[in-house]
Image (cartoon, rainbow, N blue to C red):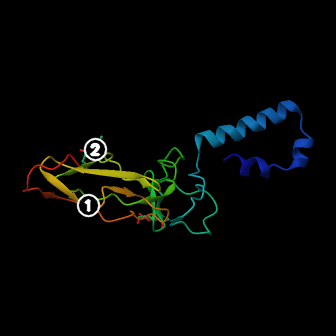
Amino acid sequence: MCNGIVESISNAFWAHTSAIERSFVLLLVLTLVSTGRGSGCVRPYMVQNSWVNLTETNRGLFPAGTVLQYSCDPGYLPDGPSILTCTTSGRWSSEPPQCIRSCIRPSVVQHGSTNVMDTNRSLFPVGTVLQYSCDAGYLLVGRSILTCTSIGDWSSNLPRCIRNYGKPGPPF
Ligand SMILES: *[C@@H]1O[C@H](CO)[C@@H](O)[C@H](O)[C@H]1NC(C)=O
Ligand SMILES: *[C@@H]1O[C@H](CO)[C@@H](O)[C@H](O)[C@H]1NC(C)=O
């Protein structure tokens, strides 16, 4: 984040100042940057497979209070907060999110359970495998294993668990 400021101090200037003066200037620059005095937030880095509502003309500092919203492309989901606010200390409220190729959260299978649904996770990156089983007394109809494919789709529909009224079957 210092690069822009440091680069703007010309090479000629550096060549004609003593080491002590250089240290002083560097200290001054670092102080200005670290206190964010009278400034705002620097332009956040770009995130692949996303869109953010800032305009290209907005090249300088963003004033405190600026709100930016990142939107991931279809098939991608953010791995963190997608709304960033420029705080009065000159920092964004968080890093921009990464947009990760991911399947959407599958809905709940009644009378069934799966290996990874016991947490509140919302990201199911490519390659995630879900394995379903049904409660005792229920039969699984459909595929018990779903994989998140490279295009961010589940490999098949969710299975269903239906009441087994017949004689007790083998455990799944
Ligand atoms: C970006 O979008 C958010 C949410 O819609 C809005 O609050 C904010 O003002 C927008 N920021 C800019 C720079 O347009
Ligand atoms: C899961 O989500 C529920 C409801 O949104 C919330 O109350 C709970 O604290 C979350 N649990 C974890 C481990 O994040």
Query: Residue shown at 11%/50% (left/top)?
Result: 137
Task: Look at label 2 and name its amino acid.
Answer: Asp
Residue 53 % position (x, y): 50, 67
Local crowd size for mark 1, using a 10 Å CA cut-off: few (<14), some (14–19), many (≥20): many
Task: Look at label 1 and name its amino acid.
Answer: Pro
Query: Residue shown at 72%/52% (left/top)?
Result: 4
Local crowd size for mark 2, using a 10 Å CA cut-off: few (<14), some (14–19), many (≥20): few
- Quickly name the residue at label 1: 159
Which quarter of the rendered image does ligand 2 occupy? Answer: top left
Q: In the image, 159: left or right of 56? A: left
Residue 2 % position (x, y): 69, 45
Q: Is residue 83 above or below residue 58?
A: above
Q: Quadrant of residue 147?
A: bottom left
Q: In the image, 19: left or right of 91? A: right
Secondary structure at badge 2 equals: loop
Secondary structure at badge 1 equals: loop
Q: Is residue 125 above or below residue 74?
A: above
- Quickly name the residue at label 2: 118
Residue 167 % position (x, y): 8, 52
Residue 119 % position (x, y): 31, 44
Residue that lies at the very extreme toward the top in this rendered image:
20
Q: In the image, 165: left or right of 70? A: left
Query: Residue shown at 11%/49% (left/top)?
Result: 168
* Observer-nearest of 143 and 53: 143
Query: Residue shown at 35%/65% (left/top)?
Result: 156
